[in-house]
Amino acid sequence: MNAPTQLAHLTPEIKQRPAPAALIDALKNRFDTQFSEAMAVREQHGRDESAFTTVPPPAGVVFAESTQDVQDAVRLCAAHKTPVIPYGVGSSLEGHLLAVQGGISLDVSRMNQVLSVNAEDLTVTVQPGVTRKQLNDEIKSTGLFFPIDPGADASLGGMAATRASGTNAVRYGTMRENVLALQVVTARGEAIRTGTRARKSSAGYDLTRLFVGSEGTLGVITEITLRLYPLPEAVSAAICSFPSIADAVDTVIQTIQIGVPIARVELIDANSVRAVNAHSKLSLREEPMLLMEFHGSPASVKEQAETVQEIARDHHGADFEWADTPEERTRLWTARHNAYFAAVQSRPGCRCITTDTCVPISRLADALLDTVREADESGIPYFLVGHVGDGNFHMGYLIDPDDPDERARAEQLNHQVVARALALGGTCTGEHGVGLHKIGFLVDEAGADAVAMMRTIKQALDPDDIMNPGKVFSAQD
């Protein structure tokens, strides 16, 4: 495989492109207090939740407040052929926002306005710094909601850039299906629009889909038009414990294959449950567990729940525990969303090397069981969570950052997880994106010719390679 497995992959060779003094002066003149060279600010914008620790911070940070600000910042950087790295809330897991070639971090978190809500058309247009929780808080009076929920309260610009999905994807799809239109600032500083509020179009190339998932390497997203959905008439959540991961996974596979329109189905392993109990002061049974949610009319929710309960019983599932009130459901899902932080706290001082893959639902058991066996044999503390309704799962390896052997073993485990997913007809990443960590895996998955085509697109749209360089694929020598 092309993906590296050695420790050197966590300390990539840095080929810095220093920001010239003339650019720094120009940014100061244009942005005044919206530009910072303070080391604390630069360091904040030079790290994310990934395991990369040795990349220098950006040379400066621009806090954009409008599309015009983004255009002006990109034009100034383009004039000096200096990298631009878009930044949302810093929750990425694969090194997306690290300044591996130096340059300027372009923070769009202040672009946080909901621009228009078209409730009759079930659409909304937002700036990229709006977070998913903020959006749902602002539109709740309309009886609509935005369902894509990756766990972290990520910015919608970042979610579009990484083609995020999350817990509701099994029913509502991913960002790919829910972004209708974009405004994007290109590498030349031009603001272009892709798509419309119409639900379909046959007009020209699908540029919206090109930018969704491009990880900031083709342009900076400054507006997003999204699909909304009516709040379901009835919602019910349940948890069910199983004696083994195999039993839990078999329950999910059968549920999906017979067509139950379940809204959420999450797997957390016993390690995750144990960490969540300690972190959130819960008393969940410390066994593999499915968290499920059903949406629809009261009658359809009841029918779905009864069907899944019968399937779970056939696979040795313990009796369902129901959460019907919003407060109870929030408590359960908050615990699930905090699983990452709960796991990290379970080993003080650790770093977490995470990976995610997605496989066809019929191969989920094969992928998961071998992955768990390898993790157990390694001796490295780990946790497993999964949006298993669509075959997507996440492994987190909790390593001592000062122990090179643990780092190397965790990277080897990551390599094996992804190699297995590809062999089973899956993908190297279901929702985290490629970033720095999975560049070699993209070649294994898509093939050298397809990656060469991606490079051709990148070169055509960004000939000076200033848009988040060093991500998705390595520079061609």
Image (cartoon, grey):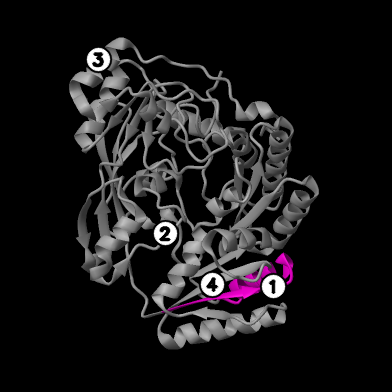
Residue assigned mark 3: 25
Q: Are marks 2 and 4 in contact (CB under 8 Å)?
A: no
- How many angstroms separate mark 3 from mark 1 (CA)? 61 Å
Rounded to the nearest angstrom, the CA distance separating label 2 from label 1 is: 27 Å
How far from the left and from the top, in percent, is residue 339?
55, 56
Query: Could you tell me if residue 202 is visible in this image?
Result: no
Label 4–label 3 contact, CB within 8 A: no
Mark toward the start of the polypeptide (3 vs 2): 3
Residue reaching furthest to the bottom: 299
Residue for badge 4:
292
Question: Dot 4: few (<14), some (14–19), or many (≥20) neighbours within 10 Å?
Answer: many
Judged from the image, the secondary structure of the residue bearing numbered disc 4 is: strand
- Residue at left 71%, top 56%? 367
Residue that appears at 23% across and 69% down: 141
Mark closest to the chain's N terminus, 2 or 4: 2
Is the N terminus in the top left, top right, bottom left or bottom right quadrant? top right
Residue type at mark 3? Asp
Question: Would residue 232 appear left or right of 338 to someone viewing this image?
Answer: left
